[in-house]
Amino acid sequence: MKISYPESRYLSGDYLHHNPSWDMEDSPWKAKKIINILETEKITPNSICDIGCGAGGVLAELRKKYAHAQLFGFDISPDATRFWPQHANSNITFQVGDIFQLNNRKYGIILLLDVLEHVPDPHSFLIKCKEISKNLLLHFPLDLNAINVLRERPILKARRNVGHIHYFTKNIALSLLKECGLKVVAWKYSGAGFNGPHRSLKTIFASIPRQLVYALNKDIGVKLLGGETLFVLAKNKVADLMDTPKS
């Protein structure tokens, strides 16, 4: 019996087959959310590293805001490289491969955008990330809600098409970070069900009952009806890491 390992879909072309745009259309929306959090927390990074950068669109958008920051993108998929030439004028350093094998520096902030749900061992992954940056900014899809569990089909679709192997609620995501020795500085629902970049008619209709339930209690509404994702800024509680290359 052939075993399909989680990372194989990113090396075999399977992910690109199911996601031919690599969600480039989401990049301006995500970058805007990231900038809002960093400005609110008064963080102006000298360097930004996007692990699992995919097509590189978020970094290209962030270049417009952070003109003098060094920008780095890593992705294990060779297929992602076909998108990178379009960002040639954005002065971004892209590398294909495992960052923990290729990396030789520390960063002002690491971005983990829709990454941990794909990683076989998110605890070990986060602990390694802590070693190369004191600031982590993460984006979690919140697949785990009552309506998705009852229907099950949306969860299986995310598993099949985009490779989700872990599923989060807000509190599960925040607990994971704390278990890895990270301090949650700020978290914010994205409003994806209401302001996401490519809302379907189904999503638009679903926003009506969500608005009603959210108005009573947002957390309970998200647990029941979904429609949200989560941005989190976390800090390494122990290490005082400098934003400089390793000696």
Image (tube, rainbow, N blue to C red):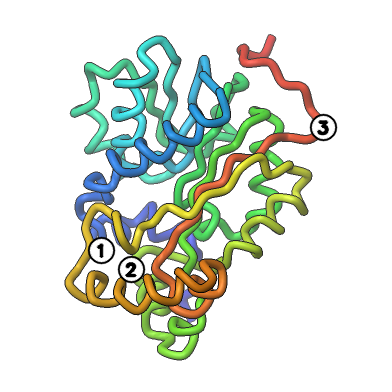
Residue 175, position in %: x, y?
Answer: 71, 58
Residue 231, position in %: x, y?
Answer: 50, 48
Instruction: Give the amino acid type for the residue marked by disc 3 in the picture.
Output: Val
Q: Earlier in the sequence, mark 3 or mark 2?
A: 2
- Asked which secondary structure carries label 1, the reply is helix
Residue that badge 2 annotates = 161
Residue count near mark 2 (Cα–Cα under 10 Å), binned few <14, some 14–19, many ≥20:
some
Residue that badge 1 annotates = 18
In the displayed structure, does residue 177 sit left or right of residue 50?
right
CB atoms of marks 1 and 2 within 8 Å: yes
Q: Residue at position x 29%, y 54% from top?
A: 195
In the displayed structure, does residue 125 sit left or right of residue 60?
right
- Asked which secondary structure carries label 3, the reply is loop
Instruction: Give the amino acid type for the residue marked by disc 2 in the picture.
Output: Asn
Residue 105, position in %: x, y?
Answer: 60, 19
Q: CA distance from mark 1 to mark 2?
A: 6 Å
Residue that badge 3 annotates = 238
Q: Above or below — where is 218 with respect to 177?
A: below
Q: CA distance from mark 3 to mark 1?
A: 40 Å
